[in-house]
Amino acid sequence: VAVAAAMLVATQVRRDPCPAYAQPPSRRPSSTTPEQAQLLQQAEQAVRDGDYRAALELHQSFLDRFPESPALSWVYLRRGYAYLALKDRGAATSSFEELSRRFPEAPEVPEALLRLGYCRLGGGDKTGAVEAFSRLASDHAQSPFAVDGALRWGTTLLANGDAAGAAAAFLRLATEFRQHGDPAADTCAQAARMLAGKGRTAKRSAVEGRRA
């Protein structure tokens, strides 16, 4: 049942596979001075040129020179992506963690939590991945990244053998989809019912086993 539910969702819900490096940012960083803006533009140019190490050096220069800038959260997000481009998952994880820890209200946090979950999952930390995905789905439900978070939350719980938790995650995902008029809502609700039924069957079997 768990495998069937996972396949049902995976085949009908197409989401971001977490590319090694993000597309050009859809939003600009928070207000900056002309000097700060110039440094960030240089870092983005380095990214476009494929020189991620140069971008990281410019990011570090920004962090050292402007420790109180409102754009720090944006810098940590782009820094995490640059590390991913260099296949340094550990450093990317640290950057996304730092962002979500230091700037919990920053607009970049939902995206950072999604990438953090992917990084932890890629590193074999399923428990940490569940924590990141669940925070995204629960604390940032209005974010455009929340749907991906709920999906990955559910599938990761399934991989951990937590059918009941996965059912709850898929039910939340179905609610999110319905609010957006997405037909995938029915698929997720069906998966949730399948998993809830599996959980009830397992509980019944355990009770009967104890009675025997």
Image (tube, rainbow, N blue to C red):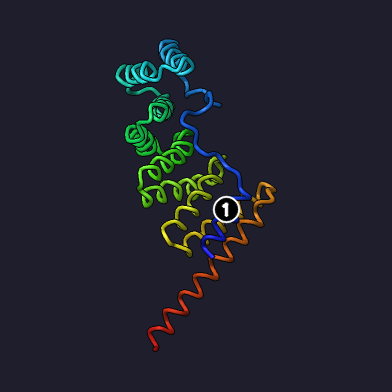
Percent x, y for residue 99?
A: 38, 34
Relative to residue 163, is residue 110 depicted above or below? above
In what element is the residue under mark 1?
A: helix
- In the rendered image, the residue lying farthest to the bottom is 212
Task: Kindly identify the residue that appears in the image at 44 percent across and 11 percent down.
Answer: 38
* Residue 102 appears anywhere in the view: no
Residue 70 horizontal side relative to residue 180, left or right: left
Residue pointed to by mark 1: 173
Pick the quarter of the image with the C terminus: bottom left
Percent x, y for residue 108?
A: 47, 33
Location of residue 83 (image quadrant): top left
Location of residue 92 (image quadrant): top left
Location of residue 58 (image quadrant): top left
Percent x, y for residue 40?
A: 43, 16
Task: Kindly identify the residue that appears in the image at 53 percent across and 40 percent down.
Answer: 145
Residue type (three-letter) at the residue carrying disc 1 = Leu
Label 1 CA crowd tier, 10 Å (few <14, some 14–19, many 20+): many
Q: How many numbered marks are there? A: 1
Relative to residue 108, is residue 11 depicted above or below? below
* Residue 141 appears anywhere in the view: yes
Relative to residue 51, is residue 185 depicted above or below? below
Task: Kindly identify the residue that appears in the image at 38 percent across and 43 percent down.
Answer: 120
Q: Nearer the viewer, residue 97 or 72?
A: 97
Pick the quarter of the image with the N terminus: bottom right
- In the rendered image, the residue lying farthest to the left is 64
Q: Nearer the viewer, residue 22 or 146?
A: 22
Task: Kindly identify the residue that appears in the image at 29 percent across and 19 percent down.
Answer: 64
